[in-house]
């Protein structure tokens, strides 16, 4: 065998790795879950070891030899053990298992990309690479360390927006947030206003504020439209008129004055439809870059998952599951660099057509979890799930409450159906102005003031 790690052939590396798995007490840390790495001769041997580790069966050379003999693999197993017995002494295995494990993974990944001959095989290679990273980058915490983390002064802080429903009840602070609603319900409008307020609040705190950086994938709206929506309320001009340059000279001056103000907010936009693997890799690069520049709290926005290029395949459920898996990888990448409680991933998604059925009219078309489009994996990976529901979107409701139609157009129902971050689950309202793309606290008029 060659001495340098980079020169070890993958077959020899796998053979040495299997030898170390049998003899090392550290074997649980170095289990290879991607069975494609093994050839037809190695795979049956490793599958027995893999099962023994998962079943927590006692492992030593005698026990393993017995299992190999029962499965007709004794000859191949003995060949591997004898081949590496002279070059790897027993006291070396706990050190060398890490070397062979990393060599095998690294070599396999290099071969994966070298053998990719077209766009689809490259995308498949990227996905497999991400899966390998996801399965191998584990961090184990024992009970004592977990208790010390709980007792530490590093408390998880909710983001502050000035919107009482979010600050006092839902309490967005960490994890993966799914915001869903029918098309045009105001998902993006509410998210823009919320994050704009959060960023401004933290900036105004100065040295006491957290440096927040946002990577915003605005795949449904162009960057120009996104910015027009950001400033519509500030200059009192609707976003479409801003795009069409239907604004006054005074409003133009106000817009120019906002350039420096918005330049203080750390948001990066991209408005092209991309594949989820590309988005994941951009997020990884963003995290590393922002860590170097002092960011304390990164936020990823995916608006929305239906705009990803992955969609449209023959099996949409498989596509949804793959997208959900990559969003989970995005979370784990943030946790690796920033730890628990110091990141947020927000993705937007549509509802299916069932919500619009007349049979749902009695409930004012309020959505339910079953209305969320696509695979249930989107719900599984989310730590917080929010529905946005505007009654003004339904003509029969507006007709039935025509005396209140000027009020109904500004009322949005927010339903929090899942909250694993310790916040509120339930229903409440928020004021949402779709013309000026802004939101505010919803407050009922006291009964004493009602005529």
Image: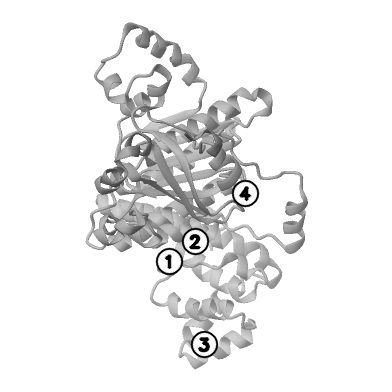
Q: Nearer the viewer, residue 392 or 437?
A: 392
Sequence-wise, the earlier of marks 2 and 4 is 2
- Residue at image point 51% right, 64% down: 13
Q: Nearer the viewer, residue 215 or 193?
A: 193
Q: Determine the CA span between mark 1 and mark 4.
A: 32 Å
- State the mark number for residue 340: 4
Sequence-wise, the earlier of marks 1 and 4 is 1
Disc 1 to disc 2: CB gap under 8 Å = yes
How crowded pointer 1 is (Cα within 10 Å; few <14, some 14-19, many 20+) is rated as some
On the image, numbered disc 1 is attached to which residue?
A: 37
**Apparent side of residue 304 relative to residue 47 in the rendered image (left or right):** left
On the image, numbered disc 3 is attached to which residue?
A: 68
Nearer the camera: disc 3 or disc 4: 4
Disc 2 to disc 4: CB gap under 8 Å = no
**Apparent side of residue 445 relative to residue 144 in the rendered image (left or right):** left
**Apparent side of residue 66 relative to residue 181 in the rendered image (left or right):** right
Sequence-wise, the earlier of marks 3 and 4 is 3
Q: Nearer the viewer, residue 312 or 380?
A: 380
On the image, numbered disc 2 is attached to which residue?
A: 104
- Residue at image point 57% right, 56% down: 420
Sequence-wise, the earlier of marks 1 and 2 is 1
């Amino acid at each position: 065998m060659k001495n340098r790690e980079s020169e070890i052939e993958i077959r020899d590396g796998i053979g040495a790795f299997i030898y170390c798995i049998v003899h090392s007490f550290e074997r649980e840390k170095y289990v290879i879950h991607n069975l494609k790495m093994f050839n037809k001769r190695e795979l049956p041997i490793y599958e027995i070891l893999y099962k023994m580790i998962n079943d927590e069966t006692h492992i030593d050379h005698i026990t393993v030899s017995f299992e190999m003999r029962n499965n007709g693999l004794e000859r191949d197993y003995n060949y591997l053990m004898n081949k590496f017995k002279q070059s790897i002494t027993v006291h070396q295995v706990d050190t060398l298992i890490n070397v062979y494990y990393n060599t095998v993974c690294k070599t396999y990944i290099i071969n994966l990309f070298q053998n990719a001959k077209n766009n689809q095989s490259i995308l498949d290679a990227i996905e497999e690479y991400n899966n390998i990273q996801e399965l191998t980058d584990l961090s184990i915490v024992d009970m004592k360390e977990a208790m010390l983390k709980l007792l530490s002064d590093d408390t998880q802080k909710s983001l502050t927006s000035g919107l009482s429903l979010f600050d006092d009840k839902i309490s967005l602070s960490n994890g993966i947030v799914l915001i869903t609603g029918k098309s045009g319900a105001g998902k993006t409008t509410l998210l823009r206003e919320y994050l704009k307020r959060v960023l401004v609040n933290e900036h105004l705190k100065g040295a006491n504020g957290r440096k927040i950086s946002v990577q915003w994938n605005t795949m449904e709206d162009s960057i120009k439209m996104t910015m027009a929506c950001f400033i519509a309320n500030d200059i009192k001009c609707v976003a479409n008129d801003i795009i069409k340059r239907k604004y006054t000279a005074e409003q133009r001056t106000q817009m120019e004055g906002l350039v420096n103000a918005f330049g203080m907010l750390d948001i990066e936009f991209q408005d092209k439809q991309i594949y989820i693997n590309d988005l994941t890799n951009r997020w990884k690069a963003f995290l590393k870059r922002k860590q170097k520049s002092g960011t304390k709290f990164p936020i990823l926005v995916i608006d929305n998952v239906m705009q990803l290029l992955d969609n449209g395949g023959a099996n949409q459920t498989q596509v949804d599951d793959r997208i959900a898996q990559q969003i989970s990888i995005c979370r784990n990448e943030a946790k690796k660099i920033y730890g628990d409680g110091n990141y947020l991933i927000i993705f937007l998604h549509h509802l299916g057509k069932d919500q619009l059925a007349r049979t749902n009219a009695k409930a004012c078309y309020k959505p339910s979890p079953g209305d969320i489009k696509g695979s249930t994996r989107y719900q599984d990976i989310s730590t917080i799930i929010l529905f946005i529901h505007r009654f003004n979107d339904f003509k029969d409701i507006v007709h039935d409450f025509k005396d209140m139609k000027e009020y109904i157009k500004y009322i949005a129902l927010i339903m929090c159906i899942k909250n694993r971050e310790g916040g509120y689950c339930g229903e409440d309202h928020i004021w949402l102005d779709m013309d000026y793309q802004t939101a505010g606290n919803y407050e009922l008029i006291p009964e004493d003031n009602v005529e």
